[in-house]
Image (spheres, rainbow, N blue to C red):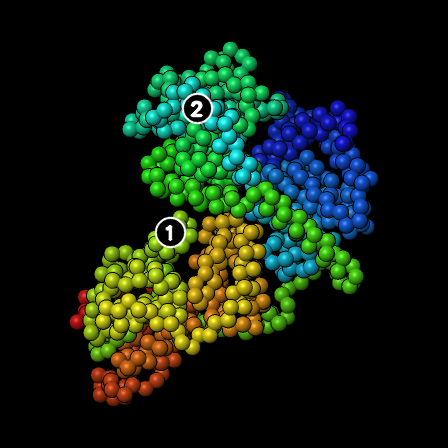
Amino acid sequence: PVFVDPWDLHDAYMEYTKTTLWPLLHNELPTQTVGVSGQYHYRRAKEAWSAYQIVNTLFANEIKARLGARDLVWVHGHHLLLLPERLSRECRQNNVPIGLYVHTPFPSNSIFSALPQRKIVLGAMLHASIIGFHLYEYARNFMISCRRLLGLVEPTRPTQNMSRGMLGLAWQSRQIVITVAHVGIEPSIVEARATSESVTRRARALRDALNLDGKIVLGGVEWLSSMQGTALKLTAYENLLESYDKWRGRVTLVQVCKPVPYKVDKGAEVAAECRAIAERVRMRFGEDALHYVEVGANDEAARRVSSIQVTPEEWDVNMRVAVWSIVDILIVSATRDGLNLLPFEYVSVRDKLRKGGMCVLSEFAGCSRVLNGAIRVNPFSLTSIIEGIDRALSQSRGDSDFSLQKDIQFVSKNTTASWVELFVKDLKRVQIAETERAESGIPAADADGLPPALSRAPSVALLLPRKLDVEMLVRAYRTATRRVLCFGLDGTLIPQDTVITHLKENHDFTGRGQAPSPAMLHCLRTLAADPANDVSVLSGRGASDMQAILGGVHRLGLAAELGFLRRSSTAAALGSRQWERHTSATDNDAWRQEAKAVMHWYTTRTNGSYSRWQESAAVWCYHDADPDFGRFQGKQLHLQLSQQLSQYPVTVTHSPSKCQVEVRIRAVNKGVTTDSILCQTHCRNADFVLCCGDDHSDEFMFAAALARARAPLTAVADRAGGAPARRTFNITVGHKPSRATLYVEDTRQVLFFLQALAQHAF
């Protein structure tokens, strides 16, 4: 134990940690240190900072006395941010890595800069070998503060301490690893409580006492703190009943509030506001419309408004689990909430009891970034909260179960044990790397550029295309006697944002295919039905999904997995559902094993990411990840896979627009597929070739079309009767450098020129 003087403990914990650090880390300026007259309380602030330093030093002294060679030190929370600096000398001497995990948010640089000791605190934290945060947003804010306040830079390539999939900072000839991993719960423990006799008995008692049978129960459990947004939730609920009379009498809200154990936050004011709203709701909509429970109610006002009396001793884990078992929809409306594991408990309990459930979570609650099945709302907008609750109430049981399963997947895989194991492994990896570095004499950090071999990699000069002249395209189409048309799917025939939204909700296309619009399908049917046309759609999707959404279009050729699996237009015309496998693509299972291990590494470190596997490819997707962090991790994964799989016959591509990194067999791409289409007997003499796509994979298609455009025709002459000619139109979606010579702005313009062509079919 660490023995601290009571006065120092009070000043360090109540004055500095709770009055200054806590609100600041939650993006609130520490105005508590300013008096009513506006005069800064310099003496009290100085004493609080001094006490904070003393407490950190006392902890450091106790650890030093017990420190052994090759131990590991893991510091938790904002109470001991100075501890890494006070331990650094002894830890380096004993090869003991220091880990620091910050369990609160980390504010923007403009807020953190208000801390008088900002540089001291940052410098002390940077003595840790690894600094962990729950979300990328917090890690990003920390790194920005380090860049702007201390002038630090991010290493452009990993060194010994830093593996792929990790962030880092170079400082004082050291490399500090920044990790992102959200702590979890132990579902097995919570599930065991959920089915225990004690919880079952309490849940039944709550249902009887609150008269909940036959009602849809909304609920929440919060501290009586201004950051919890409980008053906003109650106000939104009142407006829901006022605006949506269909829910009156059918729903009820069970709101449990706990007093803040310290007097820094304005708990009494928050409690008074919540009580007033609760009484008003009951007066307007009936006693059963809202059940407000204040734990440990110790005054007449609190006891009067509380539906039932619950003492602090009665409010234990079993009581909380009992509340989860009766709540159908959990609502969290916090205006700022760094670590809240209660929704994790709720998800686990509801899944175990097979009762279904939904979470309506504030966008400003950290857990909303990892529970991707939840409905996210803006707590500062009552309309957003009301619409979110109405959406949750209106969902079918099947949809709510599907959303709950998305959440339970994260909760079950990202447990406390797996979180601890991951961080400890990282600490040990740093320890091993430091040992090897010390023995070899290699510098600890290097902020230079990429390795020379990569920096000298050749690049292809692409030009900006010109805008498509639809009238010119139609004239060429009308005068042609034989035509070949090849299209991409996602981002070309279907808007890319629609595809991303679909993948965020379903994680795949199998069984829930995202098809082109009816208007687009009509154009494809019309063009494919023309005997003079050979129309194909090439996509990275699997064969089953391509068959499901486009298999019904007569005479439409399909190429799945970029052409690894293909159903030709001729086969389609005969009604065949058989897919041909690419014969020249030799697969080697070894690359799959390596790719799987690397992708798993990134998945465990990137909340919201997952992998999909096909016959010819592996795809790492980050649609649900933080956008900035997902792109960063995608770039890192692309670089690592390109290096690690260089000896295998595969290609690695990263598509930021589609939020994915792909590893595919090299012999298969849209260029090879397009060339095989153009080499078909009935296509060899086509005098009109149109290729339209939107991303990197379509550049191969454009290149193949250009190569065949130079090949002579044997049976088609131009209108002047001279040498045979072929008109080739390569069209990219979006104005960007491309092998295509023409562009359209978006899928709406793709539909426009397809409709123009369809008018002249036959």
Q: Residue at x 60, y 58 (%)?
A: 164
The quadrant the N terminus occupies is: top right
Q: Secondary structure at mark 1?
A: helix
Q: Nearer the viewer, residue 588 or 259?
A: 588
Q: Is residue 183 left or right of residue 675?
A: right
Figure check: 360 above or below 266: below
Frontmost residue, 466 versus 374: 374
Image location (x, y in percent) of residue 598: 56, 60
- As helix, strand or loop, the secondary structure at mark 2 comes to helix
Instruction: Name the amino acid type tagged 1.
Output: His
Marks 1 and 2, how far apart in space?
Answer: 40 Å
Label count reads 2
Q: Amino acid at mark 2?
A: Arg
**Image quarter of residue 165:** bottom right
Picture residue at 49% right of the left edge, 65% below the top: 663
The quarter of the picture where residue 479 lies is: bottom left
Residue named by callout 2: 204
Left or right: residue 557 versus residue 163 is left
- Report the residue marked by disc 1: 502
Residue 614 image offset from top left, x and y in percent: 43, 63
| In the rendered image, the vertical position of residue 104 relative to residue 646, given as above or below | above
With respect to residue 729, does 614 lie above or below? above
